[in-house]
Amino acid sequence: MPAVHVNGKAPSDYGPFGGNDNVDDPKQVVGASKTGTKLQDLPANVQIIPRALLSEQGVTMLRESVSNASGINVGGQDSKGYYDHFLIRGLNAQIYSDGFSDGDLLGGISHSLNGVERIEILEGPGSALFGSGPPGRTINIVHYTPSPEFHLGGSVEAGSFGTLSTTDYITGPTGIVGLNYRVDATFSRSDGFRDLYSRDDEIRPQLQWQLGSHTINFALDLRQIHETPDSYGLIYFHGSPISDVSIDSKYSTPFAFANGNIVRPTLSDAWKVNDFLTINNRFSYLHRTLDVLSNGDSTSTKIVGDEVVGRQLRQQDDNDNSFDYQLEPVWKFATGSVGHTLLTGFEFQHQTIDTSRTTADDL
């Protein structure tokens, strides 16, 4: 993985190209706590997957990363090869990006590691911190923040089956006092082991402004994702899963595609009122479109000779708009020599999904 860096500090301070593998470092602050609490002081089971480890493994997607944590399976109902669905100890998990929910899991988002510093996995229900959600664990994706020192980096990865991935970032001061910037970009494509073409183009500009007692962050996540849907699981033949087939067999419609566009601006303000109170105001808007042509679910699918017949063709168009507002006062106080951190808050979520589906049976 060729890479270039500018400046004198460790690359891990700024971007995804090296540094120490500090997995589960007890002194690191966990974003999933929402209180600035160190891992060693957090009364919960949290697994941390650091970027240094992910870079060593050469992974580029969230679904390739979670194998570093225990008890997680990729997939689940309606994953279909282009949704991020995870089952943790047999239960659905909710995905968050910097504490913001992805919304309804039925049409999940495919996540890359563009600008991602680490992945946090909170075991057990997270309703006390993240609101209502599925009973499995919580997956929180944490991105890098802008640095007041200039730094840039880039990498190129190439692999078999037409795989090519480029990752670039630049960060530093804007010239305005307290205002820093960062831009992360990822461009990747692959034909895949089973001829399932994919392409991912992303850019994520971000600004952080230290304005008196306020720390204001604004980020804009722009993605264009192209993936090839495929049937999940194996086709049944005479009551049992099909066997004695090549490991690179493809069962989906040859002209299947799944094209998605994502626009997600987020704005947060951490206002440190005093040593006892910090008020976090946070807002996220997610707009997503999805255009899919794939095999649908059909009980008539079967094998006749050396052909798969009885398939169902599905055309699907989704338009998703989600709003998420969070107001979270964090109180720090003491009773004698015993320190306390109290997280209070209010959250409002609103999601609308317009879906158009048409199906046709293969006679």
Image: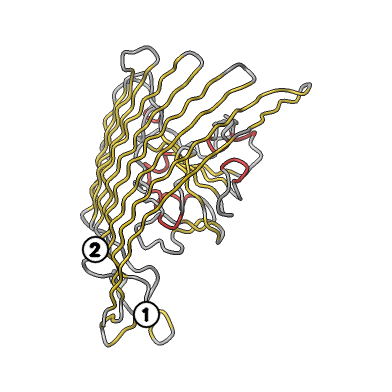
Residue drawn where x is 46% and y is 52% of the image: 104
Point out the frontmost of discs 1 and 2.
Answer: 2
- Residue type highlighted by circle 1: Ser
Q: How many residues crowd mark 2 within 10 Å: few (<14), some (14–19), many (20+)?
A: some
Residue 243, disc:
1
Taking the image as shown, residue 249 lies to the left or right of residue 270, namely: left
Image quadrant holding the C terminus, namely bottom left
As displayed, is residue 275 above or below residue 33?
Answer: above
Residue drawn where x is 39% and y is 38% of the image: 116
Whether tag 1 and tag 2 are in contact, CB under 8 A, the answer is no
Q: Quadrant of residue 221?
A: top left
Residue drawn where x is 40% and y is 61% of the image: 79
Q: Quadrant of residue 71?
A: bottom right
Q: How far across and down, in percent of the image, does residue 36 sit?
A: 57, 29
Q: Secondary structure at mark 1?
A: loop
Q: How far across and down, in percent of the image, does residue 325 sit?
A: 49, 36
Q: Quadrant of residue 9?
A: top left
Q: Nearer the viewer, residue 91 or 167?
A: 91
Q: How far across and down, in percent of the image, does residue 359 sit?
A: 30, 71
Q: Secondary structure at mark 2?
A: loop
Mark 2 highlights which residue?
A: 195
Q: Residue extending furthest right?
A: 336
Taking the image as shown, residue 71 lies to the left or right of residue 244, namely: right
The residues bearing labels 1 and 2 have C-alpha atoms spaced at a distance of 20 Å
Q: Nearer the N terminus, badge 1 or badge 2?
A: 2
- Residue type highlighted by circle 2: Asp
